[in-house]
Image (tube, helix red, strand yellow):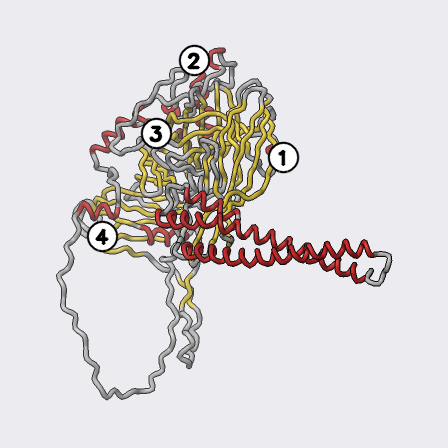
């Protein structure tokens, strides 16, 4: 491989990543100390960083110069560990106050007294001296504190391979605007944001108090006093526990021989600013990196690696063999960083010392790992992308198989040596799957149709002979897909879920994401073919029902056929349903007879009116005889119907009584879960 091309690329990359900032930070570092150099930097995603200084102190005092706008954070978060057996007595610093005129004390007890002094707001360029008073002659100190600092930013690369495998690279971009160089520090990046607030402990405040007026008082009874017996003090914590409470992790000090040995062995690593020519991996040879044998359990990650050296030099055209080369994996196994998960945060510990000059930025590789991933289609209409309501996106889909959380950040997608596009990864927990759109494909079209109806009936409640049913209000969405490409389209349909609904018999492989109120429905459409995807959403509606209704019969039959049904309830329902057909038959006959009775009564009334109108007509004798005969037959039939209705009423009442004697014994207060 042409070493000149690699060297040119390394120089260009280091120049691009080490940007110089002007006018972006205060003139002074937040905290300065000539005695204790900076040893460790931990950066979070909430605008603060944890800084740790360590070294040997030969005097009884250690002085810190703290910027005025950082004094509150320094005092609120300062943690001191003395490893030499001595102790820290106190920390002192001067106060700057502006004197104001004294105000008269109010006469009322309810009115407060204003403070006699008002604090002056500290300027960002004003330095305050904080003095640690020590005892003993020699001290091994570690001092940690929190200060404002820019957030570190993640950036990802995803190289799609075959057979559902992809290579995921994660990089961290670190900005140093602290006012001092970070020279060979231990660097950790935290994927998480603990609570942090600005403290004002450096600003003196005298709270206002009410004025007490003494008018004299005579106490005639002496109140009793209370005595609390002394208790033995609790046992002091073990030294190891005490140190762990202040500094959870043991960090190397200046005289730590083991750390010095590691530092000498790994000198030259770290970020691109401190050794970019050593951080680049090889080009064409891509080895499989085995899991790191770090003491911590987690996924190994490269610490300070630049982009793969397969990228050609801009000064000369690349040889043909390197045109289609993907970004390469890291080769240096010793550069793999440790990834640890603590609570909801993920910590990336860079193993080699890192040097980042003030007002500059560097880029370190956090991890490189093969994960499950592929490129597919995703139909997900998005606001602002007009074509997305008719065509799907091309997406990269991969699973976070690393040891912790991936923060939100941009991702570049590659395949077969070509750049496909960019997307944005949301915060991705461990073992979660991301689907990241990076382009839109007009070779596949999608049409959508929606319909609404009611489905099914289930027993919801039976109590005191009253029946309540459940019904499903259904919304069915159909996606018609036309694949105009020459390849099989593997696709996910992102369906926006309706509130308070459930998916009914979703297609196999459907991912129901209740947190985002969406469902991802998979499908495959043949080349130049068509396909359909159906999404059935249902919500429950309850309503009272009559025992003889068709919905009641449907619900009871479904309950009796369900293996989860209560045996006692099922037995009573079977007994009642043996009576129900007889009762229903009698009721139907009653309805039919009453209808016939109403029609005959109306016909009889019309016949009587006709007879009255031709009563004195001498030439209508034949018609009068015909109407009289019809009236006689109708009256006879009415008498029969009246008799039958009385019999039906008696029989129907008997069956109703028998039926309700049974159903009143049923108490069903909870419906069976609906089918899915």
| Mark 3 residue element | strand
Q: CA distance from mark 3 to mark 1?
A: 40 Å
Which residue is the site of mark 1?
A: 386
The answer to whether the residues at label 4 and label 1 have Cβ atoms under 8 Å apart is no
Q: Earlier in the sequence, mark 4 or mark 2?
A: 2
Q: Earlier in the sequence, mark 4 or mark 3?
A: 4
Dot in front, 4 or 2:
2
Rendered image quadrant of residue 49: top left
Residue 479 rendering spot, x and y as whole percentages: 57, 32
The circle drawn on residue 88 is 4
Q: CA distance from mark 4 to mark 2?
A: 58 Å
Dot in front, 3 or 2:
3
Dot in front, 2 or 1:
1
**Any part of residue 105 in sight:** yes
Residue 113 rendering spot, x and y as whole percentages: 41, 74
Which residue is the site of mark 3?
A: 301
Residue 643 rendering spot, x and y as whole percentages: 58, 58
Q: CA distance from mark 3 to mark 2?
A: 27 Å
Residue at screen point 60% across, 51% down? 592
The answer to whether the residues at label 4 and label 2 have Cβ atoms under 8 Å apart is no
Dot in front, 4 or 3:
3
Q: Nearer the viewer, residue 235 or 377?
A: 377
Horizontal side of residue 591 vs 227, given as left or right: right
User: For mark 3, does the 10 Å Cα neighbourhood hold few (<14), some (14 to 19), or many (20 or more) residues?
Assistant: many
Which residue is the site of mark 2?
A: 2
User: For mark 1, does the 10 Å Cα neighbourhood hold few (<14), some (14 to 19), or many (20 or more) residues?
Assistant: few
Q: Residue furthest top?
A: 320
Residue at screen point 49% across, 49% down? 582
Residue at screen point 84% across, 56% down? 620
Dot in front, 4 or 1:
1
């Amino acid at each position: 491989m042409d070493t000149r091309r690699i060297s040119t690329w390394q120089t260009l990359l280091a120049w691009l990543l080490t940007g110089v900032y002007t006018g972006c930070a205060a003139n002074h570092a937040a905290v300065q100390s000539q005695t204790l150099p900076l040893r460790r930097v931990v950066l979070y995603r909430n605008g603060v960083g944890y800084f740790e200084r360590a070294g040997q102190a030969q005097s009884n005092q250690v002085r810190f110069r703290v910027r005025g706008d950082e004094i509150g954070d320094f005092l609120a978060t300062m943690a001191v560990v003395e490893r030499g057996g001595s102790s820290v007595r106190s920390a002192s610093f001067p106060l700057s106050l502006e004197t104001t005129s004294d105000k008269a004390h109010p006469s009322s007890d309810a009115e407060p007294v204003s403070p006699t002094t008002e604090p002056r707001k500290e300027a960002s360029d004003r330095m305050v001296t904080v003095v640690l008073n020590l005892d003993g002659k020699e001290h091994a100190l570690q001092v940690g504190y929190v200060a404002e600092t820019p957030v570190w930013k993640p950036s990802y690369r995803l190289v799609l391979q075959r057979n559902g495998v992809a290579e995921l690279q994660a990089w961290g971009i670190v900005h140093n605007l602290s006012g001092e160089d970070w020279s060979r520090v231990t660097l950790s990046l935290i994927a998480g944001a603990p609570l942090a607030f600005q403290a004002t402990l450096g600003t003196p405040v005298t709270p206002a108090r009410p004025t007490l007026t003494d008018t004299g008082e005579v106490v005639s009874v002496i109140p009793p006093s209370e005595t609390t017996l002394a208790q033995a003090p609790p046992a002091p914590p073990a030294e190891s526990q005490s140190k762990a409470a202040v500094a959870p992790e043991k960090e190397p000090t200046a005289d730590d021989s083991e750390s010095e040995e590691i530092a000498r062995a790994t000198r030259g690593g770290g970020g691109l600013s401190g050794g970019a020519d050593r951080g680049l991996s090889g080009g064409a040879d891509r080895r499989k990196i085995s899991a790191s044998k770090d003491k911590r359990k987690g996924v190994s990650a490269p610490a300070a690696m630049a982009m793969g050296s397969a990228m050609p030099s801009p000064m000369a055209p690349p040889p043909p063999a390197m045109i289609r080369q993907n970004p390469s994996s890291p080769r240096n196994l010793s550069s793999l960083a440790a990834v640890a998960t603590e609570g909801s945060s993920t910590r990336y510990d860079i193993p080699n010392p890192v040097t980042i000059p003030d007002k500059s930025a560097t880029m370190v590789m956090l991890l490189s790992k093969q994960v499950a991933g592929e490129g597919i289609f995703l139909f997900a209409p998005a606001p602002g992308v007009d074509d997305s309501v008719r065509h799907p996106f091309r997406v990269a889909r991969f699973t976070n198989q690393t040891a912790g959380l991936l923060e939100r950040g941009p991702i570049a997608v590659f395949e077969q040596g070509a750049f496909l596009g960019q997307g944005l990864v949301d915060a991705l927990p461990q073992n979660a799957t991301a689907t990241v759109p990076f382009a839109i494909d007009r070779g596949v079209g999608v049409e959508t149709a929606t319909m609404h109806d009611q489905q099914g009936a289930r027993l919801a409640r039976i109590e005191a002979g009253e029946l309540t049913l459940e019904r499903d209000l259904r919304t069915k969405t159909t996606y018609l897909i036309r694949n105009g490409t020459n390849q099989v389209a593997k696709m996910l349909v992102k369906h926006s879920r309706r509130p308070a609904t459930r998916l009914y018999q979703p297609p196999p492989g459907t991912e129901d994401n209740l947190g985002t109120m969406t469902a991802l429905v998979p499908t495959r459409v043949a080349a130049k073919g068509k396909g359909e995807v159906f999404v059935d959403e249902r919500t429950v509606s309850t309503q009272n029902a009559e025992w003889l209704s068709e919905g009641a019969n449907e619900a009871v039959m479904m309950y009796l056929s369900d293996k989860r049904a209560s045996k006692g309830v099922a037995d009573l329902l079977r007994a009642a349903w043996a009576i129900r057909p007889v009762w229903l038959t009698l009721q139907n006959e009653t309805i039919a007879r009453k209808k016939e009775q109403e029609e005959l009564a109306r016909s009889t009334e019309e016949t009587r009116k006709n007879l009255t109108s031709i009563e004195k007509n001498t030439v209508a004798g034949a018609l009068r005889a015909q109407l009289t005969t019809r009236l006689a037959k109708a009256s006879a039939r009415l008498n029969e119907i009246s008799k039958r209705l009385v019999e039906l009423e008696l029989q129907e009442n008997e069956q109703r009584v028998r039926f309700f004697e049974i159903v009143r014994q049923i108490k069903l207060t909870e419906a069976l879960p609906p089918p899915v």
